[in-house]
Amino acid sequence: MSTIDRITYPNMDPLIALAAAAAVTDRIKLMSSIAIAPLRVNPALLAKQAASIHRISGGRLMLGLAAGGRENDCRAPNVEYEGRKPRFEDMGDERHGSW
């Protein structure tokens, strides 16, 4: 099962959808095509949510992360579009302990 992360598209939240799939399956692989990391305010919470899904699923989660390329997905939750790439890179900086 794969999910997409779009704010302005009629899809489910990818982490919630993957958690639901993890709870009712035991063999299918679970994957976020991408999760737009800069839309999440707290990178530690994103990491905790992904780790929880990974554990519930018995290690079946493959998490794809990206900065996002559609301006309307950043503007909808009032996230600065222009600053998304540096913020994304900063989220994975091991000096900050985010991941």
Image (cartoon, helix red, strand yellow):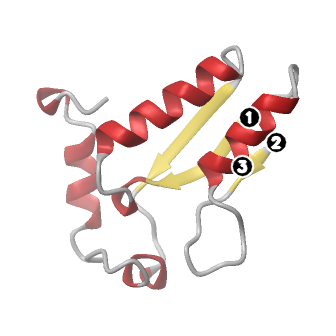
What is the number of the mark on residue 1?
2
**N-term mark: 2 or 1:** 2
Q: Residues within 10 Å of mark 1 (few under 14, many from 20)?
A: many
Precedes in sequence: disc 2 or disc 3: 2
* Residue 17: mark in rendering: 3
Question: Residue 49 appears at what percent x and percent y?
Answer: 49, 36
Of badges 1 and 3, the one in the foreground is 3
Quadrant position of residue 20: top right
Amino acid type at image mark 2:
Met
Q: Is residue 7 above or below residue 56?
A: below
Identify the residue position indicated by label 1 in the image: 30
The reply to whether the C-beta atoms of the residues labelled 2 and 3 are less than 8 Å apart is: yes
Instruction: Quote the CA–CA distance across marks 1 and 3.
Output: 10 Å
Q: Amino acid at mark 3?
A: Ala
Q: Is residue 73 above or below residue 40?
A: below
Q: Secondary structure at mark 3?
A: helix
**What's the CA distance linking mark 2 and mark 3?**
9 Å
Q: Quadrant of residue 79?
A: bottom left
Q: Identify which amino acid the numbered label 1 is placed on.
A: Leu
Residue 61 numbered tag: none
Gap in angstroms between the C-alphas marked 2 and 1? 5 Å
Q: Quadrant of residue 93?
A: top left
Disc 2 secondary structure class = loop
Looking at the image, residue 22 sits to the left or right of residue 76; the answer is: right
User: Of label 1 and label 3, which has the lower sequence position?
Assistant: 3
Q: Residue at x 59, y 61 (%)?
A: 5
Residue sitting farthest toward the top: 58
Which class describes the residues within 10 Å of circle 3: few (<14), some (14-19), or many (20+)? some
Whether the residues at callouts 2 and 1 have beta carbons within 8 Å, the answer is yes
